Amino acid sequence: MAITTGTALIFMQTTFREWFSLKMVLVGGMAMLHVLAGLMAVLAFSRNGRFSTRACLTLSTVYFLLIVAILWVVLAKPTIDSNAIAPHLFDPGALKPLLLLFLGSTKTPTP
């Protein structure tokens, strides 16, 4: 639900700021953590499964850190200079060179 509404906000309110992108990355990390927690729950209820105190503390700590980070980013809306980190990140077509790097040439031959 959070990812869906966050993505909708991008297009509804044209929120193309670096802090919002960081927030979406953190929310994506939390979604992956939910998947991990689900897998751990399935393993805990298997025949010889268990959920150790160490695993519980680790999972809870990572959840807590992600929640605090998301709240800080949303409330502080820090100014992040994306040009210093990755110039041309938000330019139209900026992902094409990366795609070509991983997939190779994608040119269609013409007859």
Image (cartoon, rainbow, N blue to C red):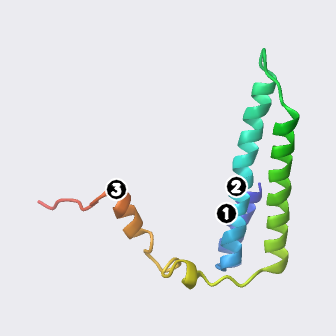
* Residue 25, numbered label: 1
Residue that badge 2 annotates: 29
In terms of depth relative to the viewer, which is nearer, 16 or 76? 76
- How far apart marks 2 and 1 lie (CA) works out to 6 Å
> Are the residues flagged by discs 1 and 3 in contact, CB closer than 8 Å?
no
Q: Residue furthest front?
A: 54
Kind of element beneath mark 3: helix
Answer above or below: position of 37 versus 45: below
Give the class, few, some or many, for how many residues have Cα within 10 Å of label 3's Cα (few <14, many ≥20): few
Q: Amino acid at mark 2?
A: Gly
* Residue 103, numbered label: 3
Q: Amino acid at mark 3?
A: Leu
**Which residue corresponds to the image point at 66% horizontal and 78% vertical from the top-left?**
18
Viewport quadrant of the C terminus: bottom left
Could you tell me residue 82's position as x and y percent? 59, 81
Kind of element beneath mark 1: helix
The mark that comes first in sequence, 1 or 3, is 1
Could you tell me residue 42's position as x and y percent? 76, 27
* Residue 66, numbered label: none
Judged left or right of residue 53, residue 99 is left
**Which residue corresponds to the image point at 75% horizontal and 26% vertical from the top-left?**
43
Q: Residue furthest left?
A: 111
State which quadrant residue 103 falls in.
bottom left
In terms of depth relative to the viewer, which is nearer, 12 or 97? 97
Answer above or below: position of 23 versus 86: above
Q: Amino acid at mark 1?
A: Val
Could you tell me residue 55's position as x and y percent? 81, 38
State which quadrant residue 108 falls in.
bottom left
**Which residue corresponds to the image point at 84% horizontal and 38% vertical from the top-left?**
54
> Are the residues flagged by discs 2 and 1 in contact, CB closer than 8 Å?
yes
Q: Is residue 66 visible?
A: yes
State which quadrant residue 85 falls in.
bottom right
